[in-house]
Amino acid sequence: MNLWHRQSEQRVDASVRCSAVHQSHICKVIQLNRWFYKEHLPSSCEPLLAVLQHLNSLDMNSKPLLLSCKNGYAGCGVALALHMILTRMNELQEVDVYRAVHCIRHSNPHFISTLDEYEFLYKSIASQLLGHSIYGNIFS
């Protein structure tokens, strides 16, 4: 197990039992286990941004990624939405929080259900732009 800013990553071997296919698959499991259920959101976006940067640096080679948190939706929803937003920002130079939230809420309506979570996404995006972008000097 490796730790990044109080988050953990574990490599898990899982076997698939199917009448047509009998094989093992390896997947990466990222647990947001320090994002406590009682803490609705972390006090800072930097640890989550560091975890997402680490995810982007992984060589997954078509291996699935499982993201989990204490209650199954709060941390995962914010992390998935932020990952989608940052990916789109890097690839298309476009920020669309509504689209990312709408997309992930289609699969689980509990993802991103409060105004605080939206605000956290916007603060995280601003932090990313200020710290890691050629546009950082515009906001200072």
Image (cartoon, grey):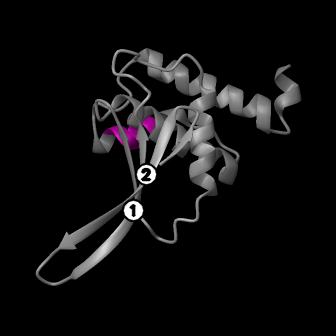
* Disc ID at residue 2: none
Which image quadrant is residue 73 in? Answer: top left
Relative height, residue 56 to residue 62 (above, below): above
Seen as rendered, the residue at the extreme front is: 1
Image quarter in which the C terminus is found? top right
* Residue 24 place in picture, x, y as percent: 29, 75
* Disc ID at residue 27: 1
Q: As drawn, is 126 to the left or to the right of 7?
A: right
Q: As drawn, is 77 to the left or to the right of 108?
A: right
How many marks can you see? 2
Q: Which residues are magenta?
A: 99-105
Q: Is residue 101 magenta?
A: yes
Q: Earlier in the sequence, mark 2 or mark 1?
A: 2
Give the number of the mark in front: 2 or 1: 2
Relative height, residue 45 to residue 11 (above, below): above
CA gap, disc 2 and disc 1? 9 Å
Nearer-the-camera pick, 8 or 53: 8
Residue type at the position of mark 1 = Cys
Task: Please rate how many residues cluster around mark 1, counting C-alpha atoms within 10 Å: few if below 14, some from 14 to 19, many from 20.
Answer: some
Which image quadrant is residue 63 in? Answer: bottom left
Q: As drawn, is 51 to the left or to the right of 71?
A: right
Quickly name the residue at label 2: 10
